[in-house]
Image (tube, helix red, strand yellow):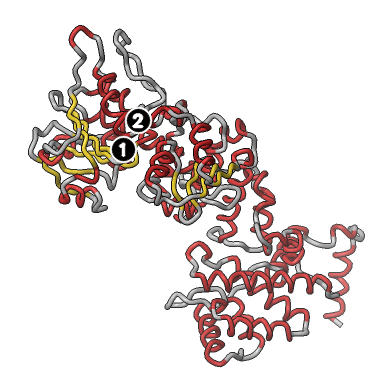
Amino acid sequence: MKDLDSLRSMLVASFAPGPRAPEAWTDEVETARMSAAIRGRHDSPAVEADKKTVAMAVAEFRRTGKPDGYRSLKYVCLGAESLDERGRCLVADKPIRERLFALLDEETELRRRLKCFQSLMLAHWSFPLSSASDEGREGWLAARAWLAASRLALERTKGTKPHWFQVLTEHKNLLADEPCDRYGKALLAGSNEELRQAMEGLAVPSDSWVVEEAVVAQMKAAAALGHAEFKGVLTDLILIAMGKKGIVFSKGLQTRCVAMLVSRYARCPDRPEHPALRDAAVGVIGNPWLRRAEWDARVIDRRGEPDGEAREMVNGWLKERLIRDFFELLSVDGSGDTRRVDYWLRFEPFIEDMWFALGGDARSRRGESHNDFKERAKGRLINLDGTTSDNNAFVMRIGEYLAVEFGAKGNAFFLFRWDRLPQRLLDKLTSGRERVDVDISALKSASYVERLIHMDSTGKRLTWEQKFDQSICPLIGQRPEEPPRRVGAGPGTRAAPAQQRQPARAANAVGGEALSTMLARIKGLGIEVVDHRDRQGALWVIADDRNKMLSEWLTAHQFRYKSPKGWWKE
């Protein structure tokens, strides 16, 4: 009876204040904590598993083609797209992955189907896509296709679905081509909320390929803007692509982004040199005239073809910058005398290749400007021996000629036939080595075609620039758009920057013959001419390169030969 009396006393004490309202029956903070714990255990997008256990399950499945029960099957899914110690992943093996997909399709119990689906989905987010082999990428695409089809089947299946499945249904684009394009505009506008919700709701890791594809989507959204709007965001996008906004990306992603940006900029009607874009393009993709094949493979226009316009744009920027650097940083005259830099900038469209022969002073000189020059000129630097340490040489290939311009005063300009160069010099210029040694005597040999002095005529009848043009232009078959410096021109007269100059006109080529006249003569010979320029295409002359006279005509008018179709120009 004492126990009953004690219970009666406690009940009276508990209910003496009166009954509590229903909303006061529970502790809201504790309830929220318990609910979160339950969701984390039973409705979380993530799956916890020991990596060693997962690796063992994958290895066993590879060996036998059978999982050791449902739990083992789930672990196989979780490790299906992870690389093993040999750099292989399960989905890269077609028979093995098809066996896995078949087993998953045979599962009928909804909870187990969802768990296995969830495990493979998590493996899918973590796949190292940027460094994957062709077989690995093929397996990743196959897994994506299976996930997309299974998601649709699960969506049609009756039964309660976890929250992460609802998130995936909302963001099913992540299992399709162009998975992140839908987030591009928002990311460009500075909002990542939609992408953040998808990543958190689906447990996408921060180093997932999804993040890289989202960056690509942002670049695509920018490329779809008008010219002025695109230029307004270009600098920030370059910083993002180059990893200077806090996130460092793979070399492959950098290349994709920079290629898109440079290709889009090339479509702008007004495209002044953009130093940050130039340096990013050269740094990530490479020197466009030294690595043309790589450029053409990576920088693609909207038709899926190599973007020659973008390549030549950066090519012109780089050549002009190097020419300016040579005369302003490395010539003895320095930046005080601009006549030579102005003169040679006019020839930039015709310079097919260039080298920079550096004396002892230039080779040892340090500083940001000199280091930047050497980085841009990498692969085309030469050690110049047999001369004063302050002398350097700017060496150019222009058509069938090699032009040599020295930095120190008192040195003449030399023009040589390319096909008559000493074999030893030719071998060094074309070796592709990082640095070669060349004696100055090889660049001043008696085999020259022209030797010219930088001296105005007595009585100022002709400037040295005019005399150079009179000798050089007929030989190379090209004449710059801008005229040379004339008598009485002020010292500040400079050649227009490459982005403001128009391509050399065919009327300035050999003989001064207009393009239309030449084409009429070609048609008169019964040779087919196809003009697609009104459709953003090229002008074609359907002929081979065996006719020497025809080849000379077309080369003079900036046509290029492409076997077996013929000659073309844009």
Identified by mark 1, the residue type is: Ile
Q: Is residue 426 left or right of residue 297?
A: left
The structure residue drawn at horizontal position 37% and vertical position 28%, both measured from the top left corner, is: 479
- Label drawn at residue 347: 2
* Residue at the farthest right position: 18
Q: Secondary structure at mark 1?
A: strand
Which percent across, then down, holds residue 391? 14, 32
Q: CA distance from mark 1 to mark 2?
A: 9 Å
The structure residue drawn at horizontal position 23% and vertical position 9%, both measured from the top left corner, is: 460
Q: Is residue 535 left or right of residue 285?
A: right
Q: Secondary structure at mark 2?
A: loop
Q: Dot 1 surroundings within 10 Å: few (below 14), some, or many (20 or more)?
A: many
Contact, mark 1 vs mark 2 (Cβ under 8 Å): yes
Q: Nearer the viewer, residue 224 or 341?
A: 341
- Label drawn at residue 184: none
Q: Nearer the viewer, residue 505 or 276?
A: 505
Whichever of labels 1 and 2 marks the residue nearer the N terminus, that label is: 2
Which percent across, then down, holds residue 565? 50, 54
Q: Image height check: is 142 above or below 95? A: above
Q: Nearer the viewer, residue 76 or 425?
A: 425
Q: Image height check: is 518 above or below 219? A: above
Reading the image, the residue beneath label 1 is 398
Please say whether residue 44 is visible from this viewpoint. yes
Q: Dot 2 surroundings within 10 Å: few (below 14), some, or many (20 or more)?
A: some
Please say whether residue 248 is visible from this viewpoint. no
Task: Give the image quarter of residue 113.
Answer: bottom right
